[in-house]
């Protein structure tokens, strides 16, 4: 049972005014100035915040728990920007993991071997020639395999034709080592230590898992959840749900093993047949289990710009007639939207290109016309590019914009190239339009898309506050700190229909809180100036460091 806790001598983020809070189990009982707090002899613990800032717990509105947990044992290449650094890091990682059948790295920029380059198997062979190696790109939509990994997967003998994915080949028909989208990456990833089950789950399919596999995967989820707690995250909106993860997390929730709240969707893919779609929609309607909730489905409408798989309304620069392709046909997508909406579910869709956004809005409009208007709060994830004509449709349809401040090139360790050139100079002003959406009255919910970016909300807040326009004629899409924090707390709560229960420091709200080591205004200059010293979820202290 949660304790009766008092946090005294804290400060408010906006005004810096002194603040104290009393928790009665899972709820906030009292909030106000320290001098006004009434005495209560039943308090079991009193915490002196020593002037630190107190916030509602962070809601990461877009992350991948299982995949993120898996990467905790892999090589993080986000900060690697040249061949020398890549060689040193990869060889050291290989020597530290002598028994791995497949060496796995993640979060690599497309130019991690140096500006103006793009990896292929020959470049990777020169670094690690004798071990199978797979490197996942920072966006999670492309990976590069060396020759040993391609041979391990049988891709040097035959290259399969894949729907919605591609094993890239050269003019002779030989694989280059570049693998685009999950269907291609899974062919190699299945040889990893965890069997590539995170990739199968990302696709919305069901892995074959033994009892020992399930135990390992639960341990992976526990590490991911503990990492969230260490950053002050009390609600995680997962993006890669399926029946397998629902069973794992459901068992953990029933056993009281979820330190934070988890919202899990059911992922519907274009290759799913009617029976599979119906089963996933039914599973999404199950009631909450402890801190685990459902109520959502997830789809992908397109890929990403760096592999030219984002679906856009105009041609890619230098690629006449190429605008990318949607992963769903309009008829297929609209039908699924109508079916899920009729079941009372929330729909969320990955959209990077502006044509993907438009097609998704069309699906939401079709559902509204078929089923009638309701407070559905359907979501669009990412919105890297938005056509100005579609801005007003968000508010008209009641759509939530779920966005990640770490995604714009030039932010959070991401280079500008090649992405900004692939987008095209004439479209820079339409990219990552946080402020435009906010000023249009569209609800914003912020997250990280971990592990495509660091999980730290402090890093994401820094990215939001420090972003610079790519050219003088591009609009400044930054928001003030108060709105950034709102999108990370109350905005996230609204996006999961929990605004009446959390996201604010107020009596009767759920006791989900985070205490910050430093003033969050300092994050405008440096992402490392702040960390979580105390995290409380449902009245339980789930992370604490000495202050």
Image (cartoon, rainbow, N blue to C red):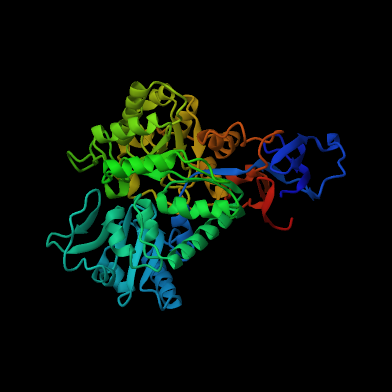
The image position of residue 285, as x and y in percent, is 44, 38
Q: Is residue 119 above or below residue 203?
A: below
Residue at horizontal 28%, vertical 37%?
A: 312
Drawn side of residue 318 relative to residue 439, left or right: left
Residue 310 makes an appearance in the image: no
Image-quadrant location for residue 84: bottom left
Residue 227 seen in the figure: yes
Along the viewing direction, whichever of 264 and 235 lies nearer the viewer: 264
* Figure quadrant of the C terminus: bottom right
The x, y position of residue 480, in whole percent, is 57, 34
Q: Does 484 sit above or below residue 178?
A: above
Image position, residue 245 (x, y; %): 44, 53
Judged left or right of residue 141, residue 466 is right
Q: In this view, does 454 lie above or below 327?
A: below
Taking the spot 38% from the left edge, 53% from the top edge, the residue there is: 201
Q: Give the residue displayed 46% in from the left and 56% down from the top.
A: 66
Q: Name the quadrant containing residue 429.
A: top left
Q: Nearer the viewer, residue 222 or 213?
A: 213
Residue at 27% from the left image edge and 72% from the top image edge:
148
Please state which of residues 288 and 536 is positioned toward the viewer in this rendering.
Answer: 288
- The percent position of residue 89, horizontal first and vertical second, equals 43, 70
- Report whether 25 appears left or right of 324: right
Q: How many marks?
A: 0
């Amino acid at each position: 049972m949660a304790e009766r806790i008092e946090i005294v001598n804290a400060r408010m983020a906006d005004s810096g005014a002194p603040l104290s809070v009393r928790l009665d189990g899972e709820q906030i009982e009292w909030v106000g100035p320290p001098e006004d707090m009434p005495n209560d002899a039943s308090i079991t613990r009193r915490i002196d915040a020593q002037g630190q800032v107190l916030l509602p717990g962070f809601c990461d509105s877009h992350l991948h728990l299982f995949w993120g947990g898996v990467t905790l044992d892999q090589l993080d290449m986000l900060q690697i920007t040249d061949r020398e650094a890549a060689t040193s890091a990869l060889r050291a990682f290989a020597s530290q993991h002598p028994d791995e059948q497949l060496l796995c790295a993640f979060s690599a920029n497309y130019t991690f071997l140096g500006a103006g380059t793009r990896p292929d198997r020959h470049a990777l062979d020169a670094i690690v020639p004798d071990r199978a190696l797979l490197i996942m790109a920072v966006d999670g939509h492309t990976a590069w395999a060396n020759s040993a990994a391609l041979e391990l997967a049988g891709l040097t003998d035959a290259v399969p034709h894949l729907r919605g994915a591609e094993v890239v080949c050269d003019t002779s028909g030989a694989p280059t080592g570049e693998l685009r989208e999950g269907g291609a990456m899974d062919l190699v990833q299945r040889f990893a230590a965890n069997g590539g089950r995170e990739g199968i789950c990302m696709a919305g399919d069901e892995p074959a898992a033994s009892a020992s596999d399930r135990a390992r995967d639960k341990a992976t989820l526990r590490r991911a959840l503990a990492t969230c707690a260490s950053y002050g995250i009390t609600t995680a909106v997962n993006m890669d749900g399926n029946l397998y993860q629902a069973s794992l997390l459901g068992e953990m929730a029933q056993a009281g093993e979820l330190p934070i709240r988890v919202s899990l969707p059911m992922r519907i893919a274009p290759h799913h047949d009617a029976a599979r779609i119906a089963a996933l929609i039914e599973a999404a309607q199950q009631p909450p289990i402890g801190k685990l909730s459902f109520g959502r489905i997830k789809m992908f409408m397109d890929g990403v710009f760096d592999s030219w798989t984002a679906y856009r309304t105009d041609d890619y620069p230098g690629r006449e007639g190429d605008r990318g392709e949607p992963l769903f046909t309009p008829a297929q997508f609209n039908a699924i939207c109508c079916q899920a909406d009729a079941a009372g579910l929330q729909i969320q869709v990955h959209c990077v290109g502006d044509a993907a956004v438009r097609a998704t809005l069309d699906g939401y409009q079709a559902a509204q016309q078929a089923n009638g208007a309701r407070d559905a709060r359907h979501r669009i994830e990412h919105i890297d590019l938005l056509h100005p004509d579609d801005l007003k449709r968000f508010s008209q349809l009641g759509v939530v914009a779920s966005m990640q401040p770490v995604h714009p090139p030039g932010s959070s360790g991401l280079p500008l190239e090649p992405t900004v050139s692939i987008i095209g100079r004439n479209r820079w002003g339409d990219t990552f339009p946080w402020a435009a959406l906010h000023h249009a009255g569209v609800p914003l919910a912020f997250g990280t898309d971990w592990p495509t970016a660091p999980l730290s909300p402090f890093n994401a807040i820094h990215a939001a506050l420090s972003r610079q326009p790519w050219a003088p004629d591009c609009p400044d899409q930054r928001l003030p700190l108060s709105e950034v924090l709102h999108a990370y707390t109350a905005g996230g709560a609204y996006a999961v229909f929990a605004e009446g229960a959390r996201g604010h420091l107020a009596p009767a709200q759920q006791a989900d809180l985070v205490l910050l080591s430093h003033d969050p205004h300092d994050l405008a200059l440096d992402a490392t100036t702040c960390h979580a010293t105390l995290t409380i979820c449902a009245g339980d202290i789930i992370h604490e460091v000495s202050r």
